[in-house]
């Protein structure tokens, strides 16, 4: 399977702590994206990082990409209860621009 | 700004009944459009995508079909629902061009087939 895989599957932290989620993939990519999904809602795009980039920031979010290890991480700093959601990575495999490949997600719970 | 609408939000249908889910996008032209299904606790499964009116690509052979009668309208249909069609259906759009660029999702439809 070329599916991206997030780990951990579930993460529970206290407000104010940092949360780190990882995504691994199997073949070369053009880009990798992170999305958030609140329970019962649609997905919201967070960050897109291209294969020639190593790090991107957006507010309290930091995404890194290590193409040699075929992995990416999403760091949420100073987490808030509102960050409680599932987080998915999606990869665009080089040479196959037909669709994104989605992981199964990390469920993050931020406790007040 | 662009917005995407999906309806209905929830739907309970008996096995064997027909289905029609509608998705519309506002504020953009010639978008790429997508239908996904998400089973409980699972990732997204791409069902169909469209790069233009009347152009539908099917990713998974199944009991469903899709149509794009207008530039910003995408419809998911079934003639006879199966129990296995239950799930959370998401419509998404992306700017015309690569179908693997950033996608913007609607609020979803929760379908329960009994």
Image (cartoon, helix red, strand yellow):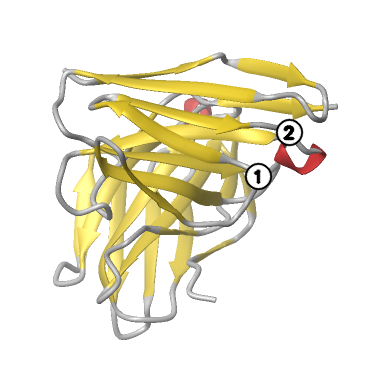
Residue at the image point whose x is 41% and y is 23% from the top: B23
Task: Say which element carries label 1.
Answer: loop
Image quadrant holding the N terminus of chain A, namely bottom right
The answer for which chain carries disc 2 is B
The residue closer to the viewer here, A80 or A102, is: A102
Q: Residue furthest bottom?
A: A68
Residue A63 placement (x, y as % from top left): 30, 57
Q: Which numbered disc, 1 or 2, marks the residue that appears first in the sequence?
A: 1
- In the rendered image, which residue does mark 1 sit on? B63
The residue closer to the viewer here, B10 or A25, is: B10
Q: Name which quarter of the figure residue A73 lies in.
A: bottom left
User: Which of the labelled discs sits on residue B81, or is there none?
Assistant: 2
The answer for which chain carries disc 1 is B
Side (left or right) of B106 relative to B26: right
Q: In this orientation, does residue B51 appear?
A: yes
Residue A86 placement (x, y as % from top left): 54, 42
Task: Say which element carries label 2.
Answer: loop
Within-10-Å neighbours for mark 2: few <14, some 14–19, many 20+:
many
Residue A46 placement (x, y as % from top left): 31, 42
Side (left or right) of B44 relative to B1: right
Q: CA distance from mark 1 to mark 2?
A: 7 Å
Q: Residue furthest right?
A: B114
């Amino acid at each position: 399977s070329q599916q991206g895989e997030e780990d951990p599957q579930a993460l529970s932290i206290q407000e104010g702590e940092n949360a780190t989620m990882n995504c691994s993939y199997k073949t070369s990519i053009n880009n990798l994206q992170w999305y958030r999904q609140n329970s019962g809602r649609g997905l919201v795009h967070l960050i897109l990082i291209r294969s020639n980039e190593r790090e991107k920031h957006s507010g309290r979010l930091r995404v890194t990409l290590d193409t040699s290890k075929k992995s990416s991480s999403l760091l949420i700093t100073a987490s808030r209860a509102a960050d409680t959601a599932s987080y998915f990575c999606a990869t665009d495999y080089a040479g196959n621009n037909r669709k994104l490949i989605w992981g199964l997600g990390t469920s993050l719970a931020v406790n007040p | 700004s662009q917005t995407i609408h999906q309806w209905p939000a929830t739907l309970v249908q008996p096995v064997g009944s027909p289905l029609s889910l509608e998705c519309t996008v506002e504020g953009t032209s010639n978008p790429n459009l997508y239908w996904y299904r998400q089973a409980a606790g699972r990732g997204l499964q791409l069902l169909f995508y469209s790069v233009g009116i009347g152009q539908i690509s099917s990713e998974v052979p199944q009991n469903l079909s899709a149509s794009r009668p207008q530039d910003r309208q995408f419809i998911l249909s079934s003639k006879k629902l199966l129990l296995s069609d239950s799930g959370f259906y998401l419509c998404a759009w992306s700017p015309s061009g690569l179908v693997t660029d950033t996608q913007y999702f609607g609020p979803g439809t929760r379908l329960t087939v009994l």
